[in-house]
Amino acid sequence: MQGNQKVIDGLNTLLGYELAAMDQYFVHSQMYLDWGLHKLYERINHEFDDEKGHATKLIERMLFLGGTPDMVTRVGYQMGKDVPEMLKSDLRVEYEVADKLREVISLAETEKDFVTRDMLMILLDDTEMDHAHWLEQQLGLIDRLGLPNYLQSQI
């Protein structure tokens, strides 16, 4: 099926964000594992898998629409150096992904590609209700408990 080039371009932009988030979560999860923060490792490794799933859906849809996925571009990648910085960086990329998802959802709606729109709505729900919400909770816990107590809870 030949899809709308604007929609395909939007999907490729989203793919760049999802690949960056995937890479960032992968590195951060390995850092948490190396530091012995096993609970953070498990959750962030799970987020890595989720981002890989998002990227897969975008690639599958682009291929169906006759597009070529851009596997090189990464948008928003920023590795943290300590736990609060890593969580803030992960939250920032989730906010950026959510904003871009809203843009491409609107574009798909305008171009009457309702299947793409519906697929992206599921990704937006996952991004806002699971990924970003959990990261906001962790940063709130650091504020309320203090960093040493938070880190102890993640061992």
Image (tube, grey):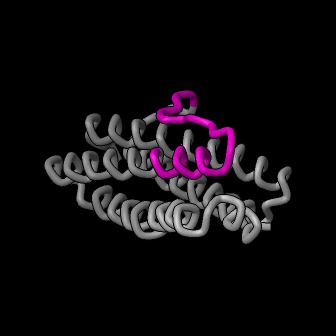
**Total numbered labels placed on residues in the image:** 0
Task: State the residue at coordinates (26%, 36%).
Answer: 6
Vertical order, 128 against 102 (above or below): below
**Looking at the image, can residue 65 be seen?**
yes
Residue 23 % position (x, y): 64, 42
Residue 33 % position (x, y): 82, 55
- Residue 75 lies within the magenta run: yes
> In terms of image quadrants, where is residue 81?
top right
Q: Is residue 61 left or right of residue 82?
A: left
Q: Which residues are magenta?
A: 72-92
**Looking at the image, can residue 63 be seen?**
no
Task: State the residue at coordinates (30%, 61%).
Answer: 115
Vertical order, 43 against 102 (above or below): below
- Residue 50 lies within the magenta run: no
Vertical order, 134 against 113 (above or below): below
Task: State the residue at coordinates (24%, 60%).
Answer: 114
Residue 18 % position (x, y): 51, 46
Q: Is residue 19 left or right of residue 33?
A: left
Instruction: State which quarter of the image contains the C terminus.
Output: bottom right
Task: State the residue at coordinates (71%, 43%).
Answer: 27
Vertical order, 137 against 23 (above or below): below
